[in-house]
Amino acid sequence: MRRSAWFFAFIAFISASTLLPTFLFGETNEDKLSYELERYTLLNAHGKPIKMWIVFTTTIIIGISGHLFVYFFQTHI
């Protein structure tokens, strides 16, 4: 359980430190109703492929670390 808690704390830290700034700083439509919803999605990455690469790379890192965690957890049982 401790290993699992440390692993998910690591995942939460990586996600928060990379994805939140990526989503928060971007341009969205001027409509106030949809502004708050679009701000936290990839709709504000239109015309900026670097944001897509940041999300893609973070997803790959999280996926690989999840597989490694499961592999090492099974070998230590």
Image: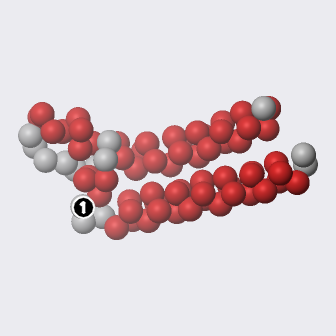
Quick check: 33 above or below 65?
above
Q: Position of residue 75 (x, y in %)?
A: 88, 54
Residue placed most toward the observer, 18 or 9: 9
Q: Check disc 1: other Cα within 10 Å, few if <14, some if 14-19, many if 20+.
A: few
Under mark 1, the amino acid is His
Residue placed most toward the observer, 57 or 47: 57
Q: Position of residue 59 (x, y in %)?
A: 52, 57
Quadrant in the rendering for residue 24: top left
13 to the left or right of 19: right
* Residue located at (47% from left, 62% from top): 56
The colouring scheme, among rainbow, by chain, secondary structure or one colour, is secondary structure
60 to the left or right of 52: right
Q: Position of residue 45 (x, y in %)?
A: 29, 57
Residue placed most toward the observer, 72 or 13: 72
Report the residue marked by disc 1.
Answer: 46
Q: Report how many numbered discs are placed on residues in the image.
A: 1
Quick check: 24 above or below 52?
above
46 to the left or right of 59: left
* Residue located at (11% from left, 34% from top): 32
- Local SS, label 1: loop
Q: Residue furthest left?
A: 31
The N terminus lies in quadrant: top right
